[in-house]
Every structure is written in structure tokens, then in C-alpha cells.
Image: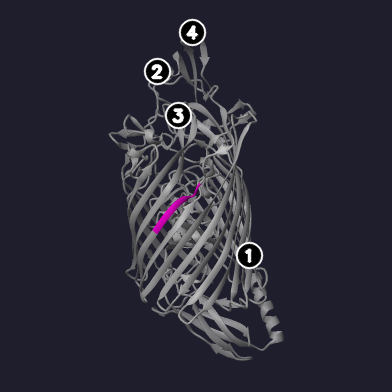
């Protein structure tokens, strides 16, 4: 702490000495207060945005700046208040005084939007549906995964039952197997992954949140198709903190139930008067949230260094990430079925079964045509690697400005997981039934670890492990020129840009079976029996089903994309109009071995192009309310993994999936209430839906379906402050989604899209007086269906979250916050999905139903230091 403070003071001293040697100098002092209460605002920044000379207010709200003589426009800012600009004149040898009042901006309506816009505009003045979350809100929401954060966004259904990674995000009723197919995850304006569908790994396996995130913006709607990677339904963009002369430093410790410990850090500040740094990261170890004997462990470090141009009209930032992380992923498992009500079952040991993952099933090996394979299942979803990114922003004297970003990423990545059954039975079996179905007339069952024989009534559960090696390399760039043009009636911001990317990834899979007893974190079971011919059979060894291991795929996909786009953002007196178009070409390269170890490959190339057009308008009715409308025709390039060969060397057709979207809405904002109401329409044609399903013989295949869908919906959100310290919030979504065409399954036309509810809501309340803060919220998820055939209905459920904290000062600009939070406060067992591996064949009958409940209740304690 002292070292960083000394560096900052040294930089300021050097600036002051240098200025005094060339120019006269004066002093500006004053007090910053809250406009409504008159109370001093502590920690507010007052600075010159050109030289970055400034000060931070003390406990009395007072500041003092020593500046060279001249005229200045100073910036005054503090979180939760509107940013102000003041004009002052500094005279040589004299002192001046300027008191400043800040206006509360609790809804952040006046905060600038950086996502899906080419100009400087606020949340309130954007003709789009936007959700903006601060770093404090993100920290309060995050518990297990990205889904915990995204649940607060209207129109979004986010599932996080699988753990920290591979969250399933469904947007406005668009058909998806989950993950981020229609809503790319971005960091600092570039997608984490530029091409979805090279394999089935999700964006969030390559990036984790940390306290170095400044904010999150979620822009919904088809207009986002113009920007960056060309999203068709919205953009999730995390903006990283960057350093300046008065940057904060933070350390956060977190302890959770079931053996969770995590440390986050953020350090930032000045290298010189023109260069600044910010670094953040985390390390965590977790034995939960479900007890498996397989620990989650890993770390990430991110950072950026930015330098200002001498003329004050440009900035260059270089940033990077390194991650080395291993996390467990939870798939559905057999639940108790009580006449369509599904709950966690009881195992052989009389305890509740929360998962069938087990540390007893690690370290297996088996021969393949390419040599002995040693299973890495103990690592779970493992990602090691990172990216290096450059970001240039420059304003030219002739009115043009340039923004250019480029990033190179390389990751060694594995997505190893326990499946949801053996692919044939998929539910617990009796010992007699197990023998009979494997062609054994008799046999004994013993624990591999002790040799002890199982009790006669103990159930068995045979499962599969799927190990997937998926290295990724991704190169992406985005650059555009903008010019601001003033005319008699409007201000135009004209933009011309280009987006280019090349991504390649492997998809090599191994699968094998193991046998355990039916309990939480099963014990391995050995089976020795006699077949119908009287021969002795060692069916399992150490729990491994002998002969079951094999490599099932050796595939490599790559995709090159290139786009150009043009847009004009026009601002009239009370009206804003955006228009734009995008043209993009895509070329994919496919290599798949036909029979692993055969050294014969099917190779093919596919290419296509897409055109998107979008328009959005906003009319400001008064200072508190505006109405907006937007519409687009967009496209989505099909996933390469879903492209088949119609004959050797000849691929299926590869055409873009066409998307029509429209939205009509209104925004309202006052000092005590802010709200948004929007109606939307989404139509998607020729969607190639790719799913992993059981092949009926113990294996897994990728099944492709072609579908058309349509969604009509309404979403609303509101936030009301009863006092400065107390507010309540609500958001509601009602949508009618259905299939309008299903090739080979016309009987599914009119069905609901799987795993997506038609009604969602969140309601909550918060208290924050600067010292004590607390909140409670409930997220309601309406009924939905487990598959496209709508054969299994999943009941509604609610997730309640709560947190509370106490902040205490530790000296000037230093503080400590102690907090506690609870996820799933009521410990409900709502089922988020059935078994995707069973697909349309899954039914709701029988003693067991294969499904995935939400994660159980979990409490966290945090201690955050800021200095």
C-alpha cells in the first residue's frame, strides 16, 4: 500500500516541479458535497483529463490542486453520481476556490455506453434495451457462474446448475442448446471466442470474472449484429479497469461452505505522467459446491498498460490474460420420480445423492489404436493459456477518429465430464438386473477399494466418462473510422469498419464406462461373473468396464470470417436515428478422421456470406421519458461441427441462418424511479440445431435438426428508491415461443422450445447507507419442457439470494468491507433440464428421471480491503 502511494505522490511531485519551472502556478481548492443533502462526498476525483493532475477529496469533501496558470475544464466524478465538468482559470501565484455539488445518479442512466455504439451516448439515450451492472453489483451477484449474474437481465434465461463454467444462456426464445450461441461473451470489446461451433465448449471456459472488471453491459436486440463479431441477439461485454493517477487498489478474500477459499486482487496506478497500469487476478480452491472428491483449483491473472499520446488526443492500451484453471462440471443424474415431481434421491448409504461424479473414477487407462490413453477426468474442465490484446484510440484534427483492436489467443483446453448414464439404461439397476442385461447368469459385486461384498439390496449405477481434448487458437481484429459531422438539423456520427478473425480448434474424444454403487460420489465396484456358456468373466476391474474404452473422434475445424460495416448515428433535437449495414463472408475448413487410427480423413471446405441491415430510432418525449424502436435482418453462420459429408469430399450445403428481430419500447427515469418496457419479435429460419445424444449402444453422436422458430414477448423492469438508502426492483418477461417448422418432425410444430420458460420474473429490495448494505431477491422461472417433443414438463421454481455487508473506514481513502451472502437461500431443488443425451426419447415415467437440479444452498463470507 505504502509503495503504491509513494509512487503516485512522486509522479505528482515531478509534474508539479516540471510545471513550475516553465510556467507560473496557482492553486485551486474547494469542497464537493451532495446536492440534495449537503453532505461531504468523500473519495470524489477532481482532475484535468489532459494532464491527469488531480486530487481525491478527504473525509470533509475537500480537495486541493496545484496547476500551471491557464484555462482548464476539469472533470469531477464519483461512483453513484453524475459526472460533472467545471471550467476554471488558474492565475500565477494566486489561489482560487470552487465548490462543487454532485447530483445522485443511482440508476446509472447517465453513464456512458461502450457496447454496441460508435459514439458517446448514455444508457437513457440509446435506442436499445441495455442492462448495465457495476463492479459492486457483479460482486454481489456472483456465486457460482456467469448465470448468477445474467439472471437479473430481462429476456434472459440463464442456467448454472453445471457449476462455474458452461452456463446456458437463452435469449428471447431463440433456439439453442445453451451456452453463448447467440450472445457472445466479450472482454473489452472483442469476443472471447470469435467462432462458435468449432466444438461445443462454451465461451466462459476461457475467461473468469475477477475484481478487475469495471462493469458489465448487456445490449439486447438485433441492432447488435453490426458490431464486432456480429452477434444476432445481444452482446455481453465486460470492461476491465484501467489505471490512472488515482486508481484504487483492492484485495478480497472469500470463504464458502464445502471448502471454498478464494483471493482476488486489483492493483493500479501510474507508471509516469502518461502511462498507467492495472493488474488483477485470483486464486481459488474449492471442494464443492457438491462433494465429489474432485477439487476445483486454479488461477487467473489479467492486466493492462495504457499510454496517452502527447497531444492528449489518443490512447494505446496493451492487455493480456493468463489462466490455468481446473473446474468440475455437473451433468444431470437420476432423480427420484414421484408422479412427475422430481427430487434428489437417497443412496445406498441412506444419504442424499447430490451428484454421481466421483474421485474414485480417476486415473483409469486403456489401450487405443494410438497407444495407451490415460484419462484426465480428475482435471475436469481444464484451461491453460491466455491472450494478448492491443487497443488503439486516436482522434484526428480533421474530425475523424480511429478505433482499432486486435487480439491473439491460445489455449490448451480439455472438457472432461461424467455423463448421465451408460447410454442404454441410464438409471440405477438392481444387481440381478445388471447381470441379466449383460449376459451373465451369476456374479458377485465387491467394492474395488476394500474387497467387501455389496449388500444384496444395494443399487448399481453404470456411467460413462467422456474426455475431450480441445486446443484453441484464435486471432481477431476490429477497426473502424468515425467522423462527427454537424449539419443544420442534425449531428451525424458516420462509421466505416472491418472485422476479421481466424479460429481453429481440435475436438478429440475418448469414452469409457465404469461401475459404481448408487450413492453420492460412488465407490467403484468389481464384478466377476459367469456367462451363459459357463465361462468366468471379469466384467469390471477396479470399477472400469473392461473393453469399454475407445477413442471416438479425431476432428479439427477452423473458420475464417471477414466483415465490413457502415453506420450513421444521427442526433436531432429530440430524436435519434441509427442506420447500418454489414456484409460478412465465412470460410470453414473441416478435417475428420474416418475411423480413429485409420489415417484416412474426410476433408472439406464450406463458405458462405451474410448481409445484415439494422435501424433504430429514439424520440425524447421529455427529460424523463423516451420511446424507441429498432429492427434488423441478421444472420448466423451454422456451427461447423454440424456440417456433414453427403459423399466423400463433398459437404452439405452451408447457408446462413436468417434472423428477423424487432423491438418497441419506452424508458423512464427520474430521481426516484427508472424503468423500461419493451415488446419484441424474433424469427429464426433454417436453424441447424446440434445436440449430443445417445446412440443406443453406449456411445454419443451429434444429431443435427433443421428448425424454424418464432417468439413474441414483453419484458419490463423497474427500480424505485423510497429513500436514498432503500430501493426495490422488479423485472418481468413473458414470451410465446414456438417451432414453426421442424424438418422430419412436423408433429413438433407449435411446440415450446426446450428448456425455455414463457414467464420469468425477479423481485428484490436493497439497503445501502454507505456503511451497512443488504439485499434480498427472488428469481422465478416458470414451467418449461425438457425436450423439443414436449414429452416432459419441468415445474416452476424460484431461487432466493441474500447478502449483507458492513463497511468501515481504515483511514483516508482506505476501507474494509465485511460481507456475507447466501445462494439459494430456501434450498429449493428446481430441475433446470432433463437429459440432453436422451433428447426427444426422454419420458417422465419410471422410478427415476434423469435431470439436473439447481445447485444447493451455499453461504459465503467475504472481506474486501480498498486502499
The residues bearing labels 4 and 3 have C-alpha atoms spaced at a distance of 28 Å
**Which sits earlier in the primary sequence, circle 4 or circle 3?**
3
Which residue is drawn at the image coordinates 51% and 47% (left, top)?
202
Residue nearer the viewer, 326 or 315: 315
**Which sits earlier in the primary sequence, circle 1 or circle 3?**
1
Element type where label 4 sits in the image: loop
Q: Where does label 3 land, which residue?
A: 423
Quadrant position of the N terminus in the picture: bottom right
Quadrant position of the C terminus in the picture: bottom right
Query: Label 3: how many residues lie within 10 Å, few (<14), some (14-19) or many (20+)?
Result: many
Residue 399 visible within the image: yes
Q: Where does label 4 land, which residue?
A: 534
Colour scheme of this structure image? one colour
Query: Label 1: how many residues lie within 10 Å, few (<14), some (14-19) or many (20+)?
Result: some
- In the displayed structure image, the side of residue 293 where residue 244 appears, left or right: right
Which residue is drawn at the image coordinates 50% and 27% (left, top)?
514
**Which sits earlier in the primary sequence, circle 2 or circle 4?**
2
The residues bearing labels 3 and 2 have C-alpha atoms spaced at a distance of 19 Å
The residues bearing labels 2 and 4 have C-alpha atoms spaced at a distance of 17 Å
**Which sits earlier in the primary sequence, circle 1 or circle 4?**
1
Q: What secondary structure do most residues of the magenta stretch adopt?
A: strand
* On screen, residue 626 above or below 632: below
Element type where label 1 sits in the image: strand
Magenta segment boundaries in residue numbering: 655-661
Q: Where does label 2 land, which residue?
A: 432
Q: Which marked residue is nearer to the observer: mark 4 or mark 3?
A: 3
Q: Where does label 1 land, which residue?
A: 317
Element type where label 2 sits in the image: helix
Q: Position of residue 803 (x, y in %)?
A: 40, 56
The residues bearing labels 2 and 1 have C-alpha atoms spaced at a distance of 66 Å
Query: Label 2: how many residues lie within 10 Å, few (<14), some (14-19) or many (20+)?
Result: some
Amino acid at each position: 500500500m505504502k509503495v503504491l502511494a509513494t509512487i503516485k505522490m512522486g509522479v505528482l511531485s515531478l509534474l508539479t516541479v516540471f510545471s513550475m519551472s516553465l510556467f507560473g502556478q496557482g492553486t485551486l481548492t474547494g469542497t464537493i458535497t451532495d446536492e440534495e443533502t449537503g453532505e461531504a462526498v468523500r473519495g470524489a476525483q477532481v482532475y484535468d483529463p489532459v494532464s491527469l493532475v488531480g486530487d481525491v477529496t478527504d473525509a470533509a469533501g475537500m480537495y486541493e490542486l496545484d496547476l500551471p496558470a491557464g484555462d482548464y475544464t476539469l472533470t469531477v466524478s464519483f461512483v453513484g453520481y453524475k459526472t460533472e465538468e467545471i471550467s476554471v482559470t488558474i492565475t500565477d501565484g494566486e489561489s482560487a476556490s470552487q465548490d462543487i455539488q454532485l447530483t445522485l445518479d443511482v440508476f446509472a442512466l447517465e453513464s456512458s455506453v461502450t457496447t454496441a455504439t460508435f459514439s458517446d451516448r448514455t444508457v437513457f439515450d440509446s435506442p436499445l434495451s441495455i442492462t448495465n451492472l457495476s463492479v459492486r453489483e457483479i460482486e454481489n451477484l456472483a456465486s457460482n457462474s456467469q448465470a448468477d449474474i445474467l439472471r437479473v437481465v430481462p429476456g434472459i434465461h440463464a442456467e448454472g446448475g453445471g457449476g462455474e463454467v458452461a452456463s446456458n444462456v437463452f435469449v428471447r426464445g431463440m433456439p439453442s442448446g445453451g451456452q453463448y450461441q447467440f450472445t457472445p461473451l466479450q472482454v473489452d470489446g472483442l469476443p472471447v471466442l470469435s467462432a462458435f461451433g468449432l466444438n461445443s465448449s462454451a465461451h466462459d471456459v476461457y475467461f473468469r470474472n475477477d475484481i478487475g472488471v469495471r462493469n458489465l453491459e448487456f445490449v439486447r436486440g438485433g441492432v447488435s449484429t453490426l458490431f464486432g463479431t456480429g452477434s444476432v441477439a445481444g452482446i455481453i461485454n465486460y470492461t476491465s479497469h484501467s489505471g490512472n493517477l488515482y486508481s484504487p487498489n483492492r484485495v478480497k478474500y472469500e470463504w464458502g461452505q464445502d471448502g471454498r477459499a478464494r483471493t482476488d486482487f486489483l492493483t493500479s496506478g501510474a507508471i509516469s505522467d502518461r502511462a498507467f497500469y492495472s493488474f488483477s487476478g485470483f486464486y481459488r480452491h474449492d471442494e464443492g459446491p457438491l462433494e465429489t472428491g474432485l477439487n476445483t483449483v486454479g488461477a487467473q491473472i489479467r492486466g493492462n498498460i495504457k499510454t496517452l499520446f502527447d497531444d492528449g488526443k489518443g490512447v494505446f492500451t496493451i492487455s493480456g490474460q493468463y489462466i490455468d484453471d481446473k473446474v468440475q462440471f455437473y451433468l444431470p443424474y437420476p432423480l427420484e420420480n414421484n408422479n412427475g415431481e422430481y427430487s434428489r434421491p437417497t443412496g445406498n448409504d441412506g444419504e442424499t445423492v447430490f451428484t454421481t461424479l466421483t474421485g474414485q473414477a480417476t486415473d483409469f487407462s486403456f489401450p487405443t489404436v494410438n497407444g495407451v490413453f490415460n484419462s484426465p477426468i480428475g482435471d475436469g474442465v481444464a484451461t491453460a493459456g491466455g491472450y494478448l490484446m492491443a487497443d488503439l484510440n486516436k482522434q484526428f484534427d480533421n474530425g475523424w477518429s480511429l478505433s482499432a483492436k486486435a487480439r491473439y489467443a491460445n489455449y490448451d483446453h480439455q472438457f472432461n465430464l461424467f455423463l448421465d448414464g451408460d447410454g442404454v439404461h441410464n438409471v440405477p439397476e438392481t444387481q440381478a438386473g445388471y447381470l441379466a442385461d449383460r449376459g451373465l447368469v451369476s456374479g458377485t459385486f465387491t467394492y474395488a477399494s476394500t474387497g467387501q461384498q455389496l449388500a444384496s439390496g444395494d443399487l448399481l449405477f453404470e456411467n460413462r466418462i467422456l474426455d475431450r481434448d480441445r486446443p484453441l487458437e484464435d486471432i481477431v481484429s476490429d477497426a473502424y473510422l468515425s467522423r462527427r459531422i454537424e449539419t443544420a438539423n442534425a449531428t451525424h456520427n458516420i462509421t466505416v469498419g472491418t472485422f476479421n478473425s481466424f479460429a481453429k480448434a481440435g475436438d478429440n474424444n475418448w469414452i469409457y464406462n465404469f461401475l459404481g454403487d448408487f450413492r453420492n460420489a460412488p465407490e467403484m465396484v468389481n464384478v466377476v461373473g459367469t456367462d451363459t456358456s459357463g465361462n468366468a468373466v471379469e466384467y469390471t476391474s477396479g470399477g472400469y468396464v473392461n473393453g469399454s474404452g475407445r477413442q471416438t473422434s479425431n476432428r479439427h475445424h477452423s473458420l475464417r470470417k471477414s466483415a465490413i460495416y457502415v453506420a450513421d448515428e444521427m442526433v436531432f433535437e429530440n430524436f435519434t436515428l441509427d442506420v447500418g449495414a454489414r456484409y460478412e463472408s465465412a470460410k470453414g475448413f473441416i478435417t475428420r478422421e474416418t475411423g480413429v487410427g485409420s489415417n484416412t480423413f474426410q476433408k472439406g471446405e464450406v463458405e458462405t456470406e451474410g448481409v445484415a441491415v439494422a435501424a433504430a430510432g429514439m424520440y425524447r418525449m421529455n427529460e424523463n421519458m423516451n420511446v424507441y424502436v429498432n429492427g434488423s435482418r441478421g444472420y448466423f453462420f451454422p456451427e461447423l461441427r454440424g456440417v456433414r459429408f453427403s459423399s466423400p469430399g463433398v459437404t452439405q450445403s452451408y447457408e446462413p441462418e436468417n434472423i428477423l428481430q424487432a423491438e418497441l419500447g419506452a424508458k423512464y427515469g427520474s430521481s426516484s424511479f427508472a424503468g423500461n418496457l419493451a415488446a419484441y419479435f424474433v424469427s429464426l429460419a433454417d436453424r441447424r440445431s446440434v445436440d449430443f445424444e445417445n446412440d443406443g449402444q453406449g456411445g454419443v453422436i451429434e444429431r443435427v435438426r433443421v428448425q424454424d422458430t418464432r417468439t413474441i414477448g414483453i419484458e419490463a423492469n423497474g427500480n424505485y428508491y423510497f429513500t436514498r438508502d432503500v430501493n426495490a426492483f422488479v423485472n418481468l418477461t413473458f414470451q410465446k415461443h414456438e417451432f414453426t417448422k421442424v424438418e422430419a418432425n412436423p408433429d413438433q410444430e407449435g411446440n415450446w422450445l426446450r428448456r425455455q420458460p414463457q414467464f420469468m420474473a425477479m423481485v428484490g429490495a436493497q439497503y445501502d447507507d454507505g456503511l451497512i448494505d443488504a439485499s434480498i431477491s427472488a428469481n422465478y422461472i416458470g414451467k418449461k419442457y425438457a425436450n423439443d417433443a414436449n414429452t416432459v414438463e419441468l415445474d416452476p421454481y424460484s431461487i432466493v439470494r441474500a447478502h449483507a455487508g458492513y463497511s468501515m473506514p481504515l483511514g483516508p481513502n482506505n476501507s474494509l468491507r465485511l460481507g456475507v451472502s447466501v445462494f439459494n437461500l430456501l434450498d429449493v431443488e428446481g430441475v433446470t433440464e432433463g437429459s440432453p443425451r436422451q433428447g426427444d426419447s426422454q419420458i417422465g415415467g419410471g422410478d427415476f428421471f434423469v435431470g439436473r437440479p439447481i445447485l444447493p444452498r451455499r453461504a459465503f463470507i467475504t472481506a474486501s480491503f480498498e486502499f
